Image (cartoon, grey):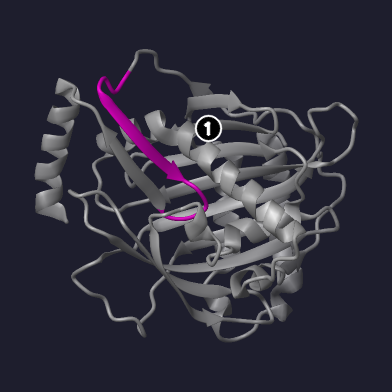
Amino acid sequence: MLISDYSILANQLIISIHMCSSLNLEGTDDVVTEKDLEYLLHLLDGKDAVWQSMIERSTSNMACQAWHYEPESGPVVYRSRTVFEDATPELVRDFFWDDEFRPKWDPMLTYVKILEECPRTGTMIVNWIKKFPFFCSDREYVIGRRIWEAGTGKTYYCVTKGVQYPGLRRRDKPRRVDRYFSSWVIRPVQSRKGDGVLSSCEVILLHSEDMGIPRDVAKLGVRHGMWGTVKKLHGGFRAYQSARKQDMSLSRCALMATIATKIFLDDSVPKDQKKEDVTTTTRGGNVGGGVDWRWVAVGGAVAVVFGLRTGTLGKVLLAGAGQRFGRRR
């Protein structure tokens, strides 16, 4: 889908939001709202950003592109487009929502609890704790999330963000991440086989968060570790796909993923399969010398795994980062 298409889509969504306003319920419905959906569409539109290319890689049954941009204030925003061959949007949607299965491919997720849920809209509030490396303490997340389904095309707009939850007392440790937005669009696309069949699934992810890590460290880590972690996520999805084929029972979170708010769109919105029409710039050079960083923003908290080698730059970066974390953690 071209960037210009998201502008058309945003206008249509605003209209449909007013049409559906009478469907809003009390309770958790005001946690993740249509305003958050509009913000996701604003990021997808991308007019206010110059995106810098990070990776463009593929395997026989998966392809990934990623970009980032740095706003004048706030955390870096990451954008990725991943296409899974032989996958349905429903299964990919369930996979990203399934917190019970997630620790099998995301070992840094050490704690999950459902705080609230709305069985009529599918809105959830969940509590996560993620384990991070030795010089960065664990992080806590209170996440509100909700799914919108567009028309009959099996296109899902999945919004997750940090929310306030007075019922959960804030502690000194783990440090809570308040500024957090991680959302994605899931839709069917044609396979690379060229048979014209919508047998593949596209996921466009937008992610940003402020967890107290300096920008330079974060950018270096993401750039050099993203592909390895994307492959790990892909392996987790294939394992999930296999388990579901063997009639694995749905977890509570996966069941909630099946409850989406319908939005009604004009079927004339183009559904082509061109690469993301993103304005990009590139930066040359081999950054990182001696540090094997593995980071990724995968539909949740940014996961970090460091594999350190003995390079001078690696020691300097870690020393500097350690001093800054010591003051900020």
Residue hosting label 1: 66
Q: Is residue 217 above or below residue 113?
A: above
Residue nearer the viewer, 22 or 90:
90
Expressed as whole percent of the image width and height from the top left, the position of residue 51 reads: 49, 30
Give the left or right position of residue 55, taking residue 322 as reference.
right
Identify which amino acid the numbered label 1 is placed on. Answer: Ala
Expressed as whole percent of the image width and height from the top left, the position of residue 233 reads: 54, 45
Residue 4 in view here: yes
Viewport quadrant of the C terminus: bottom left
Expressed as whole percent of the image width and height from the top left, the position of residue 240 reads: 64, 55
Disc 1, SS: strand
Give the left or right position of residue 299, taking residue 166 as reference.
right
Q: Residue at x 24, y 41 (%)?
A: 214
Q: Residue at x 49, y 25 (%)?
A: 53
Residue nearer the viewer, 136 or 66:
136
Viewport quadrant of the N terminus: top right
Give the left or right position of residue 6, taking residue 196 as reference.
left
Q: Residue at x 52, y 24 (%)?
A: 280
The quadrant holding residue 44 is top right
Let me know if residue 188 is in the magenta part: no
Residue 156 in view here: no
Q: Residue furthest toward the front?
A: 246
Expressed as whole percent of the image width and height from the top left, the position of residue 15 reads: 74, 61
Q: Is residue 58 above or below residue 11?
A: above
Residue nearer the viewer, 135 or 274:
135
Q: How many numbered dots are placed on residues in this image?
A: 1
- Range drawn in magenta: 287-301
